[in-house]
Amino acid sequence: MTTEGGFAAGRGPGQVSIVGAGQVGTMLGMALVSAGPEAGVTEVTVFDREPSVAAVSLERGAAHRTLQRVDEGLEADTIVLAIPVQAILSFLEEYGGRIRPGSFLIDTGSAKVAVVQAMQRRVPRTVHALGGHPMAGTEVPGPGGATPELCRGAPFALVPVRDDPAAIAQGRELVGTIGAVPVEVDAETHDRTVARTSHLPHLVAYAVAGVAREAFARGVAVPSLVSTGFVGATRLAASDPRMVAGFLWANAGEVRRSVAELTGALAELTAAIDDGPERLAGALAGVRAQVRDPA
Amino acid sequence: MTTEGGFAAGRGPGQVSIVGAGQVGTMLGMALVSAGPEAGVTEVTVFDREPSVAAVSLERGAAHRTLQRVDEGLEADTIVLAIPVQAILSFLEEYGGRIRPGSFLIDTGSAKVAVVQAMQRRVPRTVHALGGHPMAGTEVPGPGGATPELCRGAPFALVPVRDDPAAIAQGRELVGTIGAVPVEVDAETHDRTVARTSHLPHLVAYAVAGVAREAFARGVAVPSLVSTGFVGATRLAASDPRMVAGFLWANAGEVRRSVAELTGALAELTAAIDDGPERLAGALAGVRAQVRDPA
């Protein structure tokens, strides 16, 4: 059920093979199944190394059928790698050379330099390979956390692997099919950005949760006073640890730089406390204005 | 319209004077007006130094009438100080000695050692004074952000000022009236706890927002990739800067200790990145389990 003679932009995603039935794979699968044949989506399959996870994803409407083996999906028109970054790299190592010529290959990993370099090394030029990253999701891991409505209007980074306009065109088409907004960006800029807008906030959520837990354990603080603000501030620490570990590890250099910048910003704000509440409020108001208008 | 012969627990809050028509004052006022005469709430008045803010609060149903001058509320049965910590300290300095004997006085500030000490110094023993802190709210400042439903089931810290069982009883009654859960705690434990569960998360939200903004300004990152996760992680930086500055300043010692603990936790997690994604995932999973069960 593959498209004769390969795949070209303007004909839709065709037969789609999603690798990974977690939150991201299920979210994209649900959006693609909804888009349906009118949008050129002829079939969606999903594979997960945990068959029970794939079954839940199928039940949520993320695919027409599940695959038993990951290599059954290598003949699809569109292959979407929706697995943690370290698993994407392993997939490319093992299966990159076996993808059908003319196919469109995209991933959804949150660190792009490592993925794009692996695509350059492992995926033949006959395949239209593209780095991808949907900037939408929840902290709830697994297919149960998938919220396809979040795709609508959300940025979806498209990161070139080679000079391959067809890959970009097909990426734009896929992103348009699910209602997201394509943002073309090079891998380095992507990784520098998400280090600060996503990877650092994740790391900080774990660190804040750890500080509170440690204080509870030492008995210097009492969990009975935990507020809605704390729950919100540590929400990202409920994310899938394998996913978070993957992108922190794959983007370690920029993550370290971001942590250093944060430590500096914290020291500055802490020092400003000595200036008294009026001047401190002024300093905070400056940051607040920026939050409202991040551009 | 004050209660003859002062006020005693078991008769409800009586006539309530709320000082401050921001999010907290409006939230409490709406909950008290809803509770009504059956719960012993005979009248609620609200004062704000900005009359337009008091007017919005009144419109939202947080009071039966507004006061033109703050000292008009000093004769009430119950006085609620719902203003930033620095303003609470100024109020106690100026008006603490003029509160009607037999009244119940409670504040809602997020730093309790400074407030309780000021109450001890400035409020006569004839007044039943108590430190208070409702652990519920949103990051939206002003009366528009008030969400009285958040009171229901939320912890409400009650912090003794003196050995005054009547003050505690009246605090419990007030908290019960709005559907919150009283948590008796000493000022030091409160401040050590909220330093880590609230003040640190606020400071971190400003710092994370500042790091991203700085990267955008330097052109090393692009705001077009900002995700829902970033918006969530920096939400607390949208809070009222005067309120945040007040509690950071009033709880500076514990805030500094918490920042040092966070810097240590960040360094540990950053070092764990070198262990590779599998071991790092294990470390993150440990924190994640704690987040789910903070007690």
Image (cartoon, coloured by chain):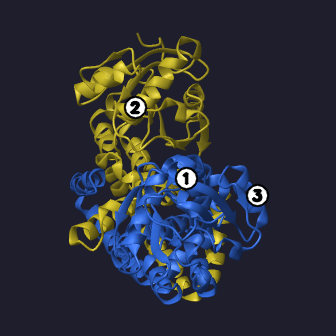
Chain colours: A blue, B yellow
Residue receiving disc 1: A231
| Residue A122 spot, x, y in % from top left | 53, 88
Q: Secondary structure at mark 3?
A: helix
Q: Residues within 10 Å of mark 1 (few under 14, many from 20)?
A: some
Q: Is residue B137 positioned above or below B276 on the image?
A: above
Q: Nearer the viewer, mark 3 or mark 1?
A: 3
Residue receiving disc 3: A55
Question: Which image quarter holds the N terminus of chain B?
Answer: top left
Q: Quadrant of residue B59?
A: top left
Q: Amino acid at mark 1?
A: Val
Q: Amino acid at mark 3?
A: Ala
Residue receiving disc 2: B25
Q: Spatial distance from mark 1 to mark 2, Cα to Cα?
A: 23 Å
Question: Which image quarter holds the C terminus of chain B?
Answer: bottom right
- The chain letter for the residue carrying disc 3 is A
- The chain letter for the residue carrying disc 2 is B
Q: Amino acid at mark 2?
A: Gly
Residue drawn at x 59%, y 23% as measured from the top left? B9
Q: Residues within 10 Å of mark 2 (few under 14, many from 20)?
A: many
| Residue A218 spot, x, y in % from top left | 62, 68
Residue drawn at x 39%, y 22% as measured from the top left? B60
